[in-house]
Amino acid sequence: MSPSSPARVAPLPAPPPRPTLVATRPIRVLFVCLGNICRSPLAEAVFRQKVEEAGLADRFEIDSAGTGHWHVGEPPDVRMRATAARRGLDLSGLRARQLRRGDLAGDLAYDHVFVMDKANLNDALYLDPHGDHGTRVRLFREFDPEPDDYQVPDPYYGGPDGFDRVYDIVERTAEAVLQRMREVYGL
């Protein structure tokens, strides 16, 4: 650069992203698996814990459901409760319920529905014959920094290692989901 050339100025850093949505009521989040006794109640509890730790409990309504009806009213699977308890999380107050059309449409519809696998996705979208749910129903692991096949494996028929693996997946994905929601909603 010659002495007569103007000095190059470093470009200004990009402004922080602005929230694309502003929540005027609590953000409603639903986690869905097959029976609502393993993966989705864990996701509900882990996400709730992360929301509380972030001081955002009043900004969210969090629940879970299953696409099937077999376990309605039952607590989470004893193996999932034990896995969560080893990591300091209590699932004992949760009870299984079945996904309903009202979870996806109407005044009480959830803003975000995170399903654990592709079968859950198909079952949830079946409740939406007109395609009204848009992108509110998503695979949970779309937000996982290590998404593998984008599905949370069902540990129900496996051994204890499967429950630990699911806990690890849910913990890191719940953190990523919360981070994304903080960006989107400006929290």
Image: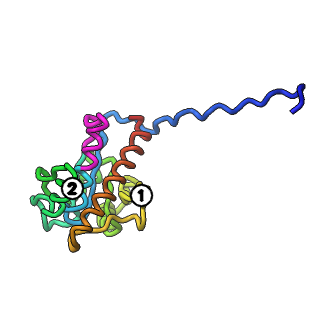
User: For this view, does 129 lie left or right of residue 4?
Assistant: left
For badge 1, the amino acid type reads Glu
Taking the view exactly as shown, the residue that stands out farthest to the bottom is 157
In the image, residue 60 lies in the stretch drawn in magenta: yes
Report which quarter residue 61 is drawn in: top left
x%, y% of residue 77?
A: 15, 63
- Report which residue position mark 2 lands on: 41
Q: Residue at x 13, y 64 (%)?
A: 71
Quadrant of residue 68 within the rendered picture: bottom left
Local crowd at mark 2 within 10 Å, few (<14), some, or many (≥20)? many
Q: Quadrant of the N terminus?
A: top right
Image quadrant where residue 11 sits = top right
Magenta-colored stretch includes residue 103: no
Query: Quadrant where the C terminus lies?
Result: top left
Colour approach in the figure: rainbow
The prevailing secondary structure element of the residues shown in magenta is helix
* Res 106 visible: no
Label at residue 142: 1
Q: CA distance from mark 1 to mark 2?
A: 18 Å
Which residue occupies the foreground of this view, 171 or 141? 171
Mark 2 or mark 1, which is nearer the start of the sequence? 2
Q: Which residue is at the front of the view, 181 or 176? A: 176
Amino acid type at mark 2: Pro
The residues colored magenta run 46-61
Residue 66 position, x and y percent, is 21, 61
Identify the residue at horizontal 42%, vertical 45% (top origin).
Answer: 180
For residue 177, above or below residue 80: above
Secondary structure found at label 2 = helix
Q: Which type of secondary structure does the marked residue at label 1 adopt?
A: helix
- The spot of residue 101 in percent (x, y) is 25, 57
Please report the residue visible at 16 percent of the width from the left and 50 percent of the height from the top: 90
